[in-house]
Image (cartoon, rainbow, N blue to C red):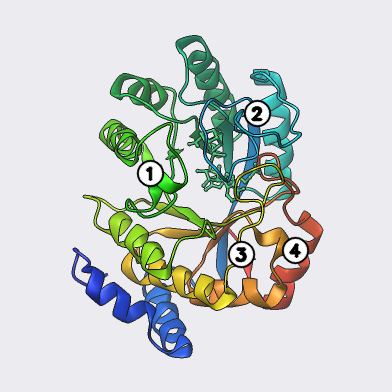
Amino acid sequence: MAHTYPKKQTLEKAKETFNLPLLQLVYQSQTVHRKYFKPNTVQISTLLSIKTGGCPENCSYCPQSAHYQTGLQSEPLITVQAVVEAASRAKSAGATRFCMGAAWRGPRDKALTQVCSMIGEVKKLGLETCVTLGLLNDSQAEKLKQAGLDFYNHNIDTAPEFYNKIITTRTFEDRVNTLESVRKSGIKVCCGGIIGLGETNDDRIKMLVFLANLEEPPESVPINRLIKIPGTPLENQDPVDPFDFVRTIALARIIMPNSYVRLSAGRESMSDELQALCFMAGANSIFYGEKLLTTENPIPEKDNRLFKRLGLEKL
Ligand code: SAM
Ligand code: DTB
Ligand code: SF4
């Protein structure tokens, strides 16, 4: 399918697009969406935290960072059996991809071997697999590839210029190096960010342009809306203007037309109408299931009702 935009996105053009009258922007993003994807379908992923809390990193938004008192109960790496049970339930509920997240700076050898067994077992159930384990080097990415991993999630989270206001225990460049290792191994890349950290619209645009200009843009782009976690430095952040959120989704769709754009964390506090606008703007994937990693997500019955009312089909 012909690309309506040049491969390399300029910041200037992206800003112009972002600032179009909202209805024109959404019309444009829905038009792009229909050229590249089957309309009215949404890909369904389910998340599971396989190692919870006590993370040495200081990401200011995160309930799992050991730097903040969020009241979260830490849990060590769970068993392969526990993963298989959760993945079977997710499959019965209609998920096509199972994503496992660990609160690590990066995986140690022994833990990585156990995650590889989890990947093998989840694949046997006929599900696509995704893991998010923090920083990786080339050989760790290779090991995950050998285990059959389909996707690796590793977010840049925000614009390069804003990144060190949010996290200081690792750099933006560390994140990008991991993305390169994942890409080189042949695993598909899932990479996006969070809206509502105190960044400007320009920062949001810069984050998306950075992703679109990677040698190959991520196959999957999760857009999270900050869940304000008591005890973290961002617990009292100002709310995001919902229309700016929709603009962010629309721009992601337009400049990364081949990528799945996932309406990720934060749906629990979004109205049905806002979610519908996000789908209209080109979001075509969600996390499905009552829990994200450690926080609440809409219960499946609620999502099923919404999908029915909107005439959306789960893929
Ligand atoms: N520790 C790994 C890492 O950071 O790469 C994997 C798990 S981490 C929880 C995955 C992503 O969840 C983060 O990059 C961030 O985008 C998102 N996230 C974490 N806390 C969030 C919050 N309070 N609101 C919205 N998104 C959040
Ligand atoms: C992503 O971008 N969002 C997901 C997934 N990738 C791993 C995680 C959202 C986490 C929200 C906070 C929590 O539940 O702990
Ligand atoms: Fe750790 Fe990931 Fe949370 Fe950062 S986002 S504190 S790396 S679990």
Q: Earlier in the sequence, mark 4 or mark 1?
A: 1
Which residue does the image show at 21% across and 69% down from the upper left? 10
Q: Earlier in the sequence, mark 1 or mark 2?
A: 2
In the image, is residue 38 above or below residue 199?
below
Mark 2 vs mark 3: give the one in front: 3
How far is disc 1 from disc 2 in space, using C-alphas? 24 Å
Look at mark 4 in the image and give the residue it sits on: 304
Q: Earlier in the sequence, mark 2 or mark 3?
A: 2
Question: Which residue type does callout 4 highlight?
Answer: Asn
Look at mark 2 in the image and give the residue it sits on: 53
Q: Earlier in the sequence, mark 4 or mark 2?
A: 2
Mark 4 vs mark 2: give the one in front: 2
Look at mark 3 in the image and give the residue it sits on: 238
Q: Secondary structure at mark 1?
A: strand
Query: Is residue 204 at all visible to an observer of this figure?
Result: yes
Residue 43: where, in percent of width, then height? Answer: 55, 57
Count residues near mark 1 (Cα–Cα under 10 Å), then give few for <14, some for 14-19, many for 20+: many
Instruction: Tell me the quarter of the image containing the N terminus.
Output: bottom left
> Are the residues tagged 3 and 4 within 8 Å (C-beta)?
no
Q: Earlier in the sequence, mark 3 or mark 1?
A: 1
Mark 3 vs mark 1: give the one in front: 3
How far is disc 2 from disc 3 in space, using C-alphas? 25 Å
Q: Secondary structure at mark 3?
A: loop
In the image, is residue 239 above or below residue 68?
below
Task: Indicate which disc residue 189 carries.
Answer: 1
